[in-house]
């Protein structure tokens, strides 16, 4: 078939595994499976959002909102910016990445991303003819190797992606490093994308600089702490000029009616948000403390809702370990497909306290049996 060359050569993206898949493969009950593989909110969605979605079910014969003004206003208030500085994506933040590519990328432009980081940037950018250039994330002290970014900047660089907290390593990019990069990139008009998908768990963010530097773009999602991964809602924040350009090319109806109501009513549910953040941070701190007691694991400190764990000392690969855990009904992320990591890393998302305890017990048993 006369398929485009980039499509023929594209590495497939390997997402985390679903409960249904694992239930079928290992003959388990879906409700018994502990899913700690995709950094979701384990406490479920906002009740207010659920109530409003159910009401709207009767109207799905109609097209959704297209200007999304109410939702932009709600997101702007939540983020402390103006509505004109917000763009909303209907396939989650992943659509925001796609709109970034459509707005900025010409064939053979380069984008820089440290490794390991979120692999979806590359997956979405390559089809537009963009070339990935890799910097480095230091695993020894879990920091960005800033020189590895600065030294790759050249006249072909169009964009830089920094994820903070970084998925999968869990650490933040320091404000100092962000400013250093902005100082070099602003006059070259290279867009610095700061992916804040997990900012709530770190309790720091970078929105205050969107009007200090013309080239900064902040990307966020409602899939993580806000409990709406299945509804696919993401957003971006930047100066209104950049946002206007992006709106020119954004699909008009990509946010479904039900997602719109889910988003609006979750953001109005302040109690839900407060609890999701607090429970998430408590669960992460508990998991970190307990995992750190297992001597054979290299547990990286996290400011997010997942923890990256080096497992080389237990003597089997991440693929083998995740397989053994799945047989016992636990899904964690095998990080072998993350560029920049070898085959000895897993990423574990926070669960409810109950799930955390069960997971730790199963993990201890599995390691004990090796
Ligand atoms: C989950 C995630 C996203 C986007 O998720 P969506 O579900 O598409 O909104 C973006 N960046 C990072 C680093 C993520 O982990």
Image: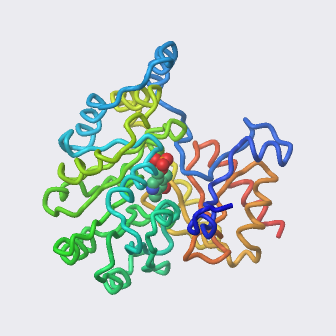
* Percent of width and height locating residue 115: 48, 75
Which quadrant is the N terminus positioned in? bottom right
* Residue shown at the point (24%, 49%) measured from the top left: 243
Residue farthest toward the right in the current orientation of the protein: 27
Decide which of 195, 245 is in the foreground and name it. 245
* Percent of width and height locating residue 76: 24, 39
Residue 175's place in the image compared with 153, above or below, is: above
The scheme the figure's colours follow is rainbow
* Rendered image quadrant of residue 31: top right
Residue 214's place in the image compared with 180, above or below, is: above
* Percent of width and height locating residue 277: 41, 43
Which quadrant is the C terminus positioned in? bottom right
Residue 92's place in the image compared with 164, above or below, is: above
Decide which of 204, 11 is in the foreground and name it. 11
* Residue shown at the point (51%, 12%) measured from the top left: 58
Decide which of 262, 99 is in the foreground and name it. 99
Residue farthest toward the front in the current orientation of the protein: 2
**93 left or right of 288 in image:** left
């Amino acid at each position: 078939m006369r398929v485009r060359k980039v499509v023929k050569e594209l590495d497939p993206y390997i997402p985390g595994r679903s409960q249904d898949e694992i239930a079928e493969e290992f003959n388990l009950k879906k409700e018994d499976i502990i899913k700690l593989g995709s950094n979701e909110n384990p406490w479920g969605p906002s009740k207010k959002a659920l109530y409003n979605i159910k009401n709207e079910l009767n109207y799905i014969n109609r097209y959704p909102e297209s200007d999304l003004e109410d939702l932009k206003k709600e997101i702007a208030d939540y983020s402390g910016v103006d509505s004109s500085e917000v763009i909303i994506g209907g396939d989650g933040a992943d659509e925001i990445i796609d709109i970034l590519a459509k707005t900025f990328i010409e064939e053979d432009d380069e984008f820089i991303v440290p490794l390991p980081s979120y692999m979806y940037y590359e997956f979405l950018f390559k089809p537009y003819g963009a070339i990935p250039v890799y910097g480095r994330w230091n695993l020894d002290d879990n920091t960005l190797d800033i020189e590895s970014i600065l030294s790759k900047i050249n006249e072909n660089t169009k964009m830089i992606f920094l994820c903070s907290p970084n998925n999968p390593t869990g650490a933040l990019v320091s404000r100092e490093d962000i400013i250093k990069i902005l100082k070099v990139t602003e006059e070259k008009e290279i867009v610095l994308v700061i992916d804040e998908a997990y900012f709530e768990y770190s309790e720091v963010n970078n929105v205050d600089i969107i009007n200090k530097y013309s080239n900064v773009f902040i990307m966020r999602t409602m899939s993580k702490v806000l409990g709406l991964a299945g509804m696919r809602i993401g957003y971006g924040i930047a100066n209104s000029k950049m946002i206007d350009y992006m709106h020119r090319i954004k699909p008009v109806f990509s946010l479904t009616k039900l997602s719109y109501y889910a988003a609006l009513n979750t953001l109005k549910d302040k109690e839900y948000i407060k609890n999701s953040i607090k429970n998430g941070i408590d669960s992460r701190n508990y998991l970190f403390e307990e995992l750190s007691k297992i001597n054979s694991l290299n547990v990286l400190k996290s400011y997010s809702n997942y923890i990256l764990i080096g497992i080389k000392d237990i003597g089997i690969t991440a693929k083998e370990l995740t397989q053994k855990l799945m047989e016992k009904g636990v899904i964690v992320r095998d990080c072998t497909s993350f560029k920049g990591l070898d085959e000895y890393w897993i990423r574990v998302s926070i669960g409810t306290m109950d799930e955390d305890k069960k997971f730790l017990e199963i993990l201890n048993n599995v390691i004990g049996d090796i």
